Amino acid sequence: MRKSLFRAEKISDRITRIHLPGEVFSYLVEGEKKAVLIDTGCGIGDLRGFVEDLTEKPLTVLLTHGHVDHAPGAVQFENVYMNLLDSRIFQEHNVLEKRKGYAESVSEKVPFTEADMLPVGSCERFRQLSDGDCFDLGGLQVTAYACGGHTPGSMVFLIQEEGYLLLGDACNPFTFLFDKSCLGVASYERNLLALQGKVQGRYGKVLISHGEGTASRNMLEENYHVCEAIKRGDVVNIPFEFQGRKAFLAKPQGRRNEFGEEMANIAYNPDRIYE
């Protein structure tokens, strides 16, 4: 399996963004004594070998959620945490054809072969990742918080000493909230409010898992306001389709704030607004 399928980009002295096949990022966070790897991609290529070239510190893997582009690569690692509410999603998505199909469907295609595909594994050995779990890396702490919506078990991570909140796919400029496994708009909104109460004033920068890799520091608030607009009916409702699944976009795509940052949008199911 090749390490050349990955590329490392330093975000700060202690945070490295890793570009993975499938237009998705993982993040390596290093303290003085330990390290965590947040997300592992589609399970294509030797991510473990690549990470071991970046750090010799004992490593723990933390998963934002169980989707095909974030979790299957975790089978390479021993010490893995995931919110087990996503166990069924992990098993449904950790299928070779689904993983290959996703990686081949994105616009920025990374060439890979059958030999690069990791074997299918189970999440039975994964440890439960719960709201408030804190990982002390030595001079640096990573704290997990629940934000169910995109999946029931979606998690975000506060790296307070670095001033970052890593939102993964839980809350971004294009939040997917329309799949059968997603929560309804009202439930997602409640979880956003709860998360905001726990992390407000503790970060100044936001990291996400796709696109530009960064987002507005106000992304939690922006997504909350989009939820409110959906409930009021103050939305454009642009038809949207992703891999055969149909939904509506609440707002036009590509809106940007005064700082040039892409603003929040939600793709949602109009039959599940008040769930």
Image: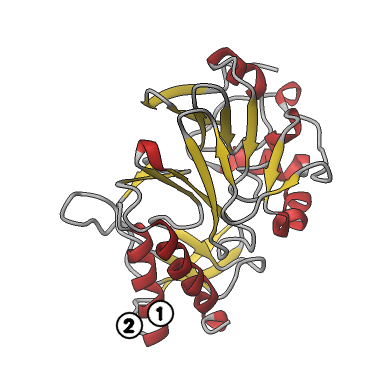
| Label disc, if present, on residue 230 of the rendered structure | 1
**Image quarter (top left, top right, bottom left or bottom right) of the C terminus:** bottom right
Query: The residue under label 2 is which amino acid type?
Result: Asp
| Percent of width and height locating residue 188 | 51, 70
The residue lying at 40 percent from left, 79 percent from top is 230
Q: Quadrant of residue 243?
A: bottom right
Judge from the rendering whether residue 108 lies leftward or rightward of residue 234; answer left or right: right
| Percent of width and height locating residue 167 | 46, 50
Q: Is residue 180 above or below residue 130?
A: below
Q: Is residue 46 above or below residue 238?
A: above
Give the CA separation, mark 1 to mark 2.
Answer: 6 Å
Residue closest to the far left: 258
Q: Which residue is mark 2?
A: 234
Nearer to me, 56 or 218: 56
Query: The residue under label 1 is which amino acid type?
Result: Ile
The residue lying at 57 percent from left, 80 percent from top is 272
Nearer to me, 238 or 67: 67
The residue lying at 57 percent from left, 22 percent from top is 5
Q: Please report contact status of discs 1 and 2: CB closer than 8 Å, yes or no.
A: yes
SS at mark 1 in the image: helix
Judge from the rendering whether residue 85 lies leftward or rightward of residue 159; answer left or right: right
Q: Is residue 245 above or below residue 237?
A: above
